[in-house]
Image: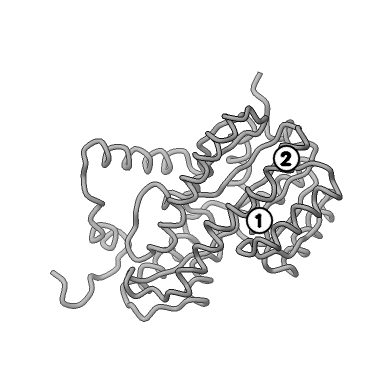
Amino acid sequence: MTITARQRFARGTAVVTGAAAGIGKGLAQRLGEFGMFVVVADIDSARAAEVAAGIVEADGRAEGFGVDVADAAQVEVLAATVFERHGSVELLINNAGIESAGLLWEIDPQRWQRVMQINVDGVFHCVKSFVPRMLDAGTAACIANLSSVGGINTVAVQSPYIVSKFAVQAITECLHQDLSIVGAPIQVSAVVPHSIRSEIFLAAQREAPTANPTANAVFAAMQRDNVEKGLDPLDAAAHMLEQIARGDFWIFSDDEMCAAATTRRGRQLLDLDPPSNPRDMLARMGVPLPEGSS
């Protein structure tokens, strides 16, 4: 009999990073609804506390925790505190991530480093701090890392994010293999969201503005499409948690769109094709070509 998310996640402790907004918030809220104690971890401690309070108000159990996943020492404190208070972690969702726009050679080095520190190093730091404790606890558990369709197919004018999500995908596959070697009772899942409503594009433009007009136009179009066509975070969370609950490795937010992305990547590698023509993407988005291009 297939186990449901409501059954599998009815008890135990879940830690969700980047859980103060977007899909992280949706996942935290659903897990609280199912019955898990949810540690709402986010760099914005005030918003994390608000999300946790909302879960409690809805008859769930949760606490907010301020943490910058780019800081290994802070992640270690998070893990130590959670295990001291709860004894085990049955679900770790490494969701924290940021975006950035621009042509690769125009990306500010500090912004590049910050994207990698949060999106990639943050996952490593959580694995480094949580997995040994999860192994010592010996209980069945799951680690789900948020990659992206951008971790399957490359996209123009957002290279830091794309590179980071390819890396997260690789980390997740390697973690799956390493845990298999030691026979750990820990499931690993690669979460591949498509478009889920969030503030990620607005935050990128606010925190790391680019002077490149094409990159700005692409991000404006992506934000528009995210608002108009993006999935509701709670709905997407429910769909993805069902797949995690039944033990899947590949977790999709939109089965059709995400399967299409993996199929495109597979065909590209089989046929040894170059990356897709970005002009096609610009045309679909209604973004004009840069001046002087033909």
Contact, CB < 8 Å: mark 1 with mark 2?
no
Q: Is residue 85 above or below residue 255?
A: below
Q: Amino acid at mark 2?
A: Met
Whichever of callouts 1 and 2 sits on the residue coming sooner in the sequence is 1
Query: Could you classify mark 1 by the number of other residues whose Cα lies within 10 Å: few (under 14), some (14-19), or many (20 or more)?
Result: many
Nearer the observer: mark 1 or 2; the answer is 2
**In this figure, which colouring scheme has been used for the structure?**
one colour
Disc count in the image? 2
Nearer to the camera, 204 or 60: 204
Name above or below for residue 190 compared with residue 167.
above
Report x, y in % for residue 59.
Answer: 85, 49
Residue 229, horizontal then vertical, whole percent: 47, 55
Residue 112 locus on image (x, y percent): 45, 69
Q: Which residue is mark 2?
A: 134
Can you identify the residue that label 1 sits on?
17
Q: Which mark is residue 124?
A: none
Whole-percent x and y of residue 187? 62, 33
Q: Is residue 67 above or below residue 177?
A: below
Residue at left 73%, top 56%?
A: 40
Report the residue that reaches farthest toward the bottom: 211
